Structure formats: structure tokens, C-alpha cells
Amino acid sequence: MAGTAAPALAIAFWRNAAGSLVLAPFALRTRERRTEMRTQDRRGWLTTLFAGAMLAAHFATWVSALKLTSVASATALVTTQLVWVVLIDRIRGERATRGVLAGMGLAIVGVFVISGVDFSLSTRALSGDLLAIAGGLFAALYLMAGSAIRESWSTTSYTFVCYGICAVLLLVASLVAGVDLAGFSTKTWLLIAAVTVCAQLLGHSLLNHLLAVMSPGLISLLLLLEVPGAALLAGIFLGQTPPLGVYMGLALILAGLAVVVLRRPAPAVVLAE
């Protein structure tokens, strides 16, 4: 997405709108899925609406961060969503062990290392870092809301509705901000299509499916695998070679988040439908 010549909000809108349209026939063609959506209670719809709003906020901040700072920094900082998951659980009454707190501290040190290095480069890079951290918060809220709603909704129905809500909110934001949603080159449209297929339909949809059997914290751990891969691809295709300090911060974040997951109590497994 960092190499796509389109506004951040436009990329976010089109990948969600296209994702929802692709899923529409599968969500609406069977009576079971239509009944599932029609009989969903008020709490279920509100939770899904919240999840869609958080997904929209995540994309708006995360894609914008990729335009302002290095891919390595943005990807590392957005994975702090695991720290946000732990903090939100603490607010909800779940106690954190010393090991979890130590891991969070290590990850936060890594955040400061990356932010400090980027601040020494430019305020633009630092702004991207802050947007990536905010994107991590919104991603945590999105995963936790999805974990709750997946107890009663199938993957197809939930993903179709959530992407649709997200696309509508991003469309409104784009129109208010005066962002161009069309007029891109053929190459840009092809890149947006690739992002939709790979990251949206295969990536996010798989995460939504896993929410029925895995906790948001464990899924956040799996997302850590994106960090070294994204940094490597950015170096190859975008020519981005961040300062050594960024990689030091990246390593601290990965180590800290790994400690958080290893020291957290195992959650109860929710069976999928």
C-alpha cells in the first residue's frame, strides 16, 4: 500500500467496498445467512457497527502511516495492538502478571526507540509513527468486538456486514475530506485490486474466521509475522532502508510482545459454528 499512488482513504475505501461486494453473493444467496442477519439482536448489530467503525479508523490511520513513515516502522508500531488488548482486558477487570507487564514495558521501549529515531529524521516520520500506534489501538478494538460477535455470527455474514459498514464510513470520510476516489492509473487500480484480494479477502477475512476459535491476543501474535516480511519487501521493492535504530526498536517490540503472549493465561476456546 505504501507504493500505491492513491490517497490513503481511497485505498482503504476501495479494498473494503470491493471486499463486501465480493462476499455479498455468498452472504445473501442462502436462506440460512439471510435469516442469521435478519434475526440478529440489537446488541449484535451494535457490536458489528462498532467493529466496522474501528476497522475504518484502523485503515484510515494505518494506511496514512504507510505514506508518512517507513514500512518497517509503521508495521512494527501497529503490532502494538497486542499491548492495547492487554490494557483493555485490564480495564475490564483481568489482572496482568508480572511477566506480561515486563513484556509490555519492553515493547513500549521499542516504540520509543523507533519514534525517537524517526523524530530525528523528520516530524513527518514521527506523525506516521503516531498514526501507526493509533492504528494498533483501533485494530485491537476491532478484533475484540469481532471476537464477541463471532459467537453468534458466521464468518461470511459478519465479514460481509463489517466490510460494508467500514466502506460506508470511509466513503463519508473521503467525501468530507475531499479525497479523490477515482481517476487513478491502470497500475494503481491493479495494485488496489491486489491489496483487496491478498490483504482483505485472504488476510482480514481469515482473521475474522479465526476469531471464533482464537483469542484476539493470539491473533495479534500471528500478525507479528508481518513485521520482518514487510520490512524485507519494502527494502527490495521500495528501496527503504531505515536506520539501524529502527531495526533495534523493531526487535524490542517483537521480543516484548512475544513475552506478553507467552506469559498471558490461556483463554477459553470459543467453538465456531
Image (spheres, rainbow, N blue to C red):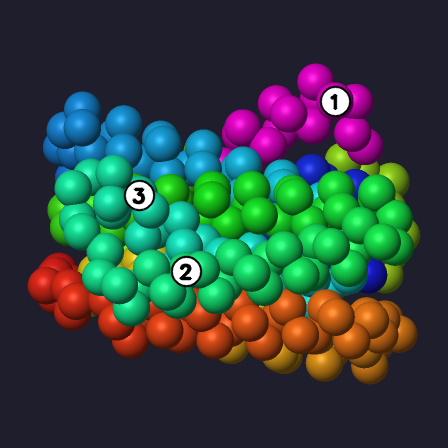
Numbered range of the magenta stretch: 166-180
Viewer-proximal residue, 127 or 169? 127
Viewer-proximal residue, 197 or 78? 78
Question: Which amino acid, mark 1?
Answer: Ala
* Residue 153 among magenta residues: no
* Left or right, 190 with reference to 248: right
Q: Which mark is residue 177?
A: 1
Estimate the x, y position of residue 194 in percent, counting from the top left. Answer: 67, 65
Q: Residue at x 45, y 33 (%)?
A: 53
Instruction: Give the SS element for disc 1.
Output: helix
Residue at the spot of label 3: 88
Q: Main secondary structure of the magenta part?
A: helix
Q: Which marked residue is nearer to the observer: mark 3 or mark 2?
A: 2
Pointers 1 and 2 in contact (C-beta within 8 Å): no
Residue at the spot of label 2: 104
Instruction: Give the SS element for disc 2.
Output: helix
Estimate the x, y position of residue 214 in percent, counting from the top left. Answer: 24, 66
Task: Point out the image quarter for the C terminus.
Answer: bottom left
- Write down the quadrant of residue 233 in the picture: bottom right
Q: CA distance from mark 1 to mark 3?
A: 31 Å
Please report whichever mark, 3 or 2, sits nearer to the chain's N-terminal start: 3
